[in-house]
Amino acid sequence: MAAISNFSVYLPKRTRTNQEISEQFPEWDVEKIANKTGIESRHISAENELSSDMAVSVGKKFFQEHAITRDEIDFLIICTQSPDYNFPNTACLVQDALGLSKNTGGLDFVQGCSGYIYGLALASSLVDSGIAKNILLITSETITKFINDQDKGNLTLFGDAASATLVSSTNSTKSGVPKHFVLGTDGSGGKNIIMHRGAMRNPDFMDGEVSKDQYGNVFDKNYLYMDGPEVFKFTLFTVPKLINDVLSKSSLSNDDVDLYIFHQANGFMLEQLRKVLRIPKEKFHFCLRTTGNTVASSIPIAIQDAQEKGLIEKGNKILLAAFGTGYSWGACIVEY
């Protein structure tokens, strides 16, 4: 049975603080940003630091931190919305750069904020079917390179990060077994979190005036666009049902779950979800104060943080849930 047992996280050296944002947008003071988002600082990839670079960095860190060798990895999965190239895929580049065996399978997938749950589902299926024994699941995103430098809303929310997780057929006492996956998709919301430029439909920079919404956020088709109010409505409508579905599938109640770890979208949204779902504060893990919204990397960062704080113990049941661009969403139970 597939299990997750080791985590590593890579955060770029450069940071963007609330003070820096406030100096650029004086109408938003430091306290207002923190209260609105739950974020005080975020890590920003260097100008020439791409997703493959961060994937290699977290991969090297993984092998330094854990007692597993490169030769033991037989599959590499990378989740990224910001690949170096349309092709070859990032997994091929990272396999070579990390010195993994040429017998290692490798694939990329694009899933955004729900990517970690989808990655666990893919990796678990490969292990449970006998196709692979030790899968390195990497999330790597340079989302900040997609943000217009005048878009104060998205500047406050997003940060860059990479994570690495071992998914294997291990019996380690420190491992957690992901089960009872629930996944969903609603492409009608695709227009509400979108990067128009860069792929085949709009490969080049597009001309046109830059506009602003009622909140002063910049809309420029050459950069990330997110309709915050629509995304918020989607989240409040979709996530409660998602949680109910995964609890029903696993025959668990709210009280049976020891810790809830959601995609760390922003502090206000998470607190609203917590209240709607009536989850006690001590069972709901916040982990975005110094990282921001790191897209698919936010859940593994939060899991590692919870482990380091002693919040996850043997016998615990953890509910993971993610939601975002697509629209897409997913959840599962991890039993330790």
Image: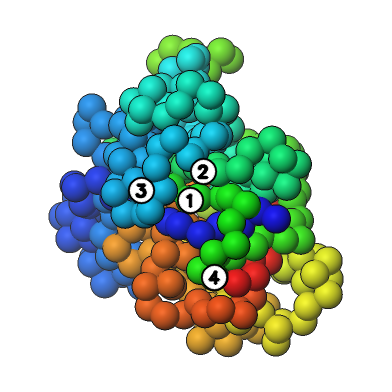
Estimate the spatial distance between the alpha carbons at disc 3 and disc 1, rounded to whole Å: 8 Å
> In the rendering, which numbered label is found on residue 173?
4
Amino acid on which disc 4 is placed: Thr
Instruction: Give the x, y percent position of residue 228.
Output: 53, 52
Estimate the spatial distance between the alpha carbons at disc 1 and disc 2, rounded to whole Å: 5 Å
Estimate the spatial distance between the alpha carbons at disc 3 and disc 2, rounded to whole Å: 11 Å
Amino acid on which disc 2 is placed: Leu
Q: Residues within 10 Å of mark 3 (few under 14, many from 20)?
A: many
Estimate the spatial distance between the alpha carbons at disc 1 and disc 4, rounded to whole Å: 16 Å
SS at mark 4 in the image: loop
Instruction: Give the x, y percent position of residue 98.
Output: 35, 31
Colouring convention used in this rendered image of the protein: rainbow
**Which of the 4 image quadrants contains residue 275?**
bottom right
- From the viewer's side, name the closer residue of 54 and 285: 54
Q: Which residue is mark 1?
A: 165
Q: Which residue is mark 3?
A: 62
Question: Residue at the location (23% across, 67% down)?
Answer: 30
